[in-house]
Image (spheres, rainbow, N blue to C red):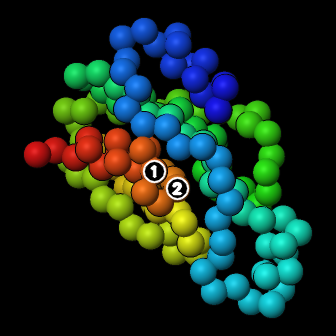
Amino acid sequence: MTAHLAVLRRNFGAQLLGVSRRGPARLRTPSFVERVTEVLTPATVHATVVCGDSRELHVVHRGQHVTPRRKPAHALARTVIPLDRISRVTATDHERLDGARVIDVRVGGANLLFSVASGSETERALLGAAPR
């Protein structure tokens, strides 16, 4: 989270729109082996920060949104999305994890997928970018 916010501080014109902290996620219907694995190395939905201005959104996140354990964030990604290029934004429950949602942002011909914690500020900020 600290590294995420450091990236934001360098981006003076952007307003903080949403933050979600790193947290655990449980498999929806785990097999016996998956249950044992989940106890030993639980899945983690990583922190995401969304900021923006009147022209674009900046999403600061891990390269992998979900990992099988609590690893420190060594690989941060920053995705810049021009607001006028967004054609739609949808949210669906993560197919394998309870407590996680997948936000699909359609930009031009590309779909940008972000796995975030259900009900988080980040989810609301990304959904708020949908064209009206």
Amino acid identity at mark 1:
Ser
Say whether residue 17 is left or right of residue 84: right
Residue shown at 65% from the left, 47% from the top: 22
> Which residue is disc 1 drawn over?
120
Q: Position of residue 54 (x, y in %)?
A: 22, 22
Q: At numbered mark 1, what does the secondary structure look like: helix, strand or loop? A: loop
Q: Is residue 54 left or right of residue 124?
A: left
Q: Is residue 42 visible?
A: yes
Q: Residue at x 46, y 13 (%)?
A: 11
- The quadrant in which the N terminus is found is top right
Q: Compare residues 15 and 103 and report the one nearer the observer.
A: 15
User: From the viewer's perspective, is residue 65 above or below residue 25?
Assistant: above
**Residue displayed at 84% across by 65% down:** 41
The residue that mark 2 highlights is 117
Which type of secondary structure does the marked residue at label 2 adopt? strand
Tell me if I can see residue 111 in this picture. no
Residue 118 position in % (x across, y down)? 47, 60
CB under 8 Å between discs 1 and 2:
yes
Identify residue type, mark 2. Ala
